[in-house]
Image (tube, coloured by chain):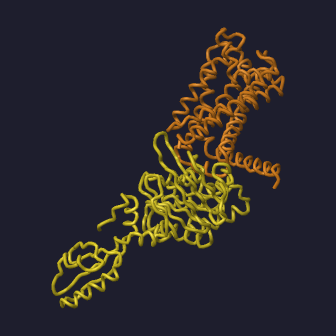
Chain colours: A yellow, B orange
Amino acid sequence: MTADNNFAIEVRGLVKHFGEVQAVAGVDFNVRRGEMFGFLGPNGAGKTTTVRMLTGVLDPSEGTATIQAHDIRTEALLSRAHLGVVPEEANVYLDLSVWRNLMLMAELHGIPRRQRVREGERLLEALGLTDRKLHKARTLSKGLRQRLMLCAALVTGPEILFLDEPTSGLDVASARLIRQIVRQLNGNGLTVFLTTHNMDEAEEMCSRVAIINQGRIAAIDAPERLRSAMRSSQYLEVTLGGGQMDAAKLEQLPGALRVTREGDYARLYGEQPGLLAIEVARVAEAKHLHIVHLCTRKPSFEDVFLYFTRDQGQELSS
Amino acid sequence: MTPYTELVHTWGRQGHGALVIVKKNALLYYLKPPVLIFGVLFPIFFFLAFKMGRPIPPENIVPGMVAMALWFTASAVGPLVTPWERRAKTYERLISTPVSIRTILAGDVISGFIFGGCLSVVPIVLGLAMTDACIVSAGELVGGIVLGALSFASLGVLLAAPPASSPSNIMLLSNLVRLPLLFVSGIFLPISRMPAWARCIAPVSPLSYAGDLIRGGFGQKTYFPVWLSPTMLIAFTGVLTWCACRFHRRWREKGL
């Protein structure tokens, strides 16, 4: 497989079988250098299996990928030399101290002594673990263990950082700190591959996301563009004062696809909610009604996710 | 970089990786209860069970004691490390670093070798201090300990390959292999005095050859020609390590 220098990760036809079960059914995607790339999908969709293949934990059944232009099948050691991995479960060595955990990872990556000590101390400081340096990892809370995992991944000086549900189950402070550090690192040019269930996190942090469902890539684009792709799920929310307009009348407005009611609100679904707003204002004026509330809404990123991971022909009605 | 220098660089990196694994194992596993129970207490109790109430000159049992201690200690580390790491999910972390499975296993073999080699010094010192035993051939004794520790450690690493969910299952499996071999390897009774069926089985146990060399080291009569034991121990180490690499790779995914 020939690699493009613009891409940190190139995945081509990656397949993974576990006996009769096909966990990943031929996925293709690229991650650009310096990009923060989100990888989303429901439970059992093939996210973690894909990440495990890319990080060398599992061998692909078919297809391949390159990491920094090194094929994961034929140049496995070289491809793994560029990675830092923070798995979902903080699998630190519980009986080693925080410092020894860090140094072990750095030594396995062949980082020279002076560099690993300097980087280790800097990272412990940045992630608020300096005062725990000599404590055994067993004594750390879940949030602190996850911070330690991030330190251990970064102390090796990776070019690509794989984060598998990095903030899942963490307290607000730890989750925020991890996001902040990751964003900073990405700003400095680190490529980040983020697997998450947290839609807000994906939307907030990632420049592009791939949604995987039943082992296949269902969609891949910038979150905003994916949202725009669900054009008929955009809507206008309106409350009128001085009387009500019935749903049948609203549905007759040009561009309205359907109308739903929720309490005082009427929701008019259409591909161009802005034009719908103009129509509603015109009719309200003609019927001497005043507008109490009027705003256009796009589907949430959670709606986008559900859309692409359900039967794709059916957009959400609410 | 020429292919030759690249090869040297890769071997250098992997060799360093193996030593890092050794350091990790020493820090984490040498003092774990299963290692101490099966590696240290087991041989002591076997020795007491064998010796007490029997009119055997103490110096005669020193070589057997050394070989038995080496057998249990060197093969105790391997069966613990991989299952323990699989359960703690740290194994997944190890195999996503730029070290190969072969390197990880080499580190595990060296860990068992060092643990067994160092602890076998204890019965030697006790034997020399408390009995009339003396070292007649240091070469045979050191050869028996070094090559024996390597082959026993390789066996231990091979026994860790099955994808068991709990380290205790692997420890049970390892004892299922180690205990029967102990009784057919001339430890409690010289091979020449064992029944015919046991003499047929003795050559398939690496402990027979290590025990024979150690016996020779203490000036006792050996059963195998002196050239055969080192050759067989080297062969055992090679074959067991090769099998360990093969099975660990095959069962790697099942054990995650």
Q: Is residue B10 above or below residue B177?
A: below
Placement of the C terminus of chain A among the 4 image quadrants: bottom left
Q: Classify residue B158 by image quadrant.
A: top right
* Horizontal side of residue A230 vs A163, given as left or right: left
Q: Residue A23 in the image: x percent, y percent?
A: 47, 48
- Compared with residue A124, is residue A239 higher up or lower down, i.e. above or below? below
Say which quarter of the image contains residue B40: top right
Residue nearest the observer in this picture, B55 or A194: A194
Q: Is residue A138 visible?
A: no
- Taking the spot 63% from the left edge, 36% from the top edge, the residue there is B78
Vertical placement of B75 versus B184: above or below?
Answer: below
Q: Image check: B135 left or right of B253? A: right
The answer to whether residue B170 shows anywhere in this view is yes
Task: Single out the residue that lies furthest toward the top.
Answer: B196
State which quadrant residue B237 falls in: top right
Q: Residue at x 30, y 86 (%)?
A: A278
* Nearer the observer, B22 or A97: B22
Residue B81 lies, in percent from the top left, at: 60, 40
| Residue located 25% across and 80% down the image | A253
In the rendered image, residue B165, in percent from the top left (x then y), is placed at: 50, 38
Residue A47 % position (x, y) = 49, 55
> Which image quarter holds the N terminus of chain A?
bottom right
Task: Give the mark count.
Answer: 0
Residue in the foreground of this view, choosing between B156 and B12: B12
Residue appearing at x 72%, y 31% in the figure: B238
Instruction: Judge left or right: residue A3 versus residue B129.
Output: left
Q: Nearer the viewer, residue A64 or A171?
A: A64
